[in-house]
Amino acid sequence: MRSPRRSNHLFHIQPTGNFWGLAIISIFLFFSRFLFDETFFLNALYVILIYLVLSFIYSLFVLDFISIERKFRKRQWQVGDRFEEDLTIINRSVIPVLWIDLKDDSEIRTNSIHYVTGLIKGKGRHYISSSFYLQKRGKLPLGPIELKSSDPMACFEANRVILMSGSITVTPYGINLATGKSRKKDSEAARAARFTLQQSDMTSSSVRPYMEGDPLSRIHWATTARRGFIHSRHQDISIEQTTWILLDCQRQAHFCNTFPFTENGYHNTENVEYFLPCDTFETSVSIAFSLAISWIQKGISVGIALNQENEFIIQPGRGSRQMDEIVEILTFVKAGSVFPISQLLRNMSRRIIPGHICYLITPENNRDLAIACHEAESRKIDLRVVSINRMSYENRSRIKLNDIPRLSNNTFEFSYGDGLSKLSEIL
């Protein structure tokens, strides 16, 4: 990605302490010329004045022909991925640049970072390679980038802000809970739950005698061999064919840390365990993303509902198109709602077919929500509550909330420091 032309940047130049020092010396030389009547003082004054004029002109144009190029592998990433890029500083002028202080203020980083380079010759280039772990989701712009340089004696400081064009999209962090890969720290219940999900079918089937028009792929050979005539499988719709995910987006319910990614850090998700940030909403988004991945990969229809200002619902569907739509929603969703999750649960309870699975992801735990959960279960909905332990996030410890009542018969507590693989227990 190349930086835009000068019409798209901010530039200013300002004198430094060295300039004011030379200015004072110039005044001293000016009065000394009349006091001592020596040509040396006048010649020295001319030298200083000529240098200040030339240094001002140099500083005025030193960054004018500097451009930045950013090169990276792709435009869509996932939180926790290692982002590697090559940044090139290009001097398109014949005038050399003595030094450049480059400050990257792009939103792909949580904190600004400085790069200081030495001499860049005329028509020369300077290459910078960097890599870091992506810690924010959403559409992240690649700029701005601030450049700083000066003349040889640093009398004038030139600053230029380049508004880089382009952006990258970072999707939430999540794992496929149905891969069947068992980690050493998994409990027996987690491995059994994951195995059940991996082996489960989208539909149940019954065997009946072969009828004209049945495809050959539906022939049940074991029953055919046992009974002596052809039988075929008849597919029945399973009550677990649809799964709903309800995500609590109420701002008041969540603990959102201002700097949520500095507690445990990010690691390469392919080699070591990934640590979720100290932020209940980001954790909830990752949980919703993982559940959606796991069920859609098995061919189960997944729908999602958010308690936004206007109730937002994605109707159940399966396949890559449905997954892309869910990913897009979870990439940009924010905890900015004022409506309680209990209101959304009551509205959805009237729409969800009895027997369907409904995941409720929330850090909220109050009497009204408990009543709403009881009403949903009374409608024969398979309600599974992922209760985010907010207190553990506020204190950054694994605090157990034994004195708070469970919201439903199938409540799963997720505390600070837990990994997403633990969710296999509630599948």
Image (cartoon, helix red, strand yellow):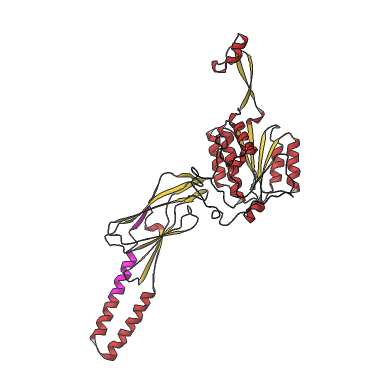
Kindly indicate the quadrant of the structure image that contains residue 21. bottom left
Front-most of 351 and 282? 282
Q: Position of residue 314 (x, y in %)?
A: 61, 38
Q: Left or right: where does residue 79 sit relative to residue 231?
A: left
Tell whether position 58 is magenta: yes
Tell whether position 391 is magenta: no
Q: Position of residue 254 (x, y in %)?
A: 64, 52
How many numbered marks are there?
A: 0
Q: Position of residue 395 (x, y in %)?
A: 64, 56
The quadrant in which the C terminus is found is top right
Kindly indicate the quadrant of the structure image that contains residue 235. top right
Q: Which segment did they paint magenta?
A: 50-70
| Residue 76 seen | yes
Residue 319 vertical position relative to residue 258 in the rendered view, above or below: above
Most extreme residue toward the front, as rendered? 184
Residue 143 vertical position relative to residue 273 in the rendered view, above or below: below
| Residue 427 seen | no
Front-most of 319 and 388? 388
At 55% from the left and 56% from the top, the residue drawn is 259
Front-most of 275 and 98? 275
Q: Left or right: where does residue 135 sit relative to residue 398?
A: left
Most extreme residue toward the top, as rendered? 228
Kindly indicate the quadrant of the structure image that contains residue 210. top right
Q: Position of residue 71 (x, y in %)?
A: 38, 48
Most extreme residue toward the bottom, as rendered? 35
Most extreme residue toward the left, as rendered? 39
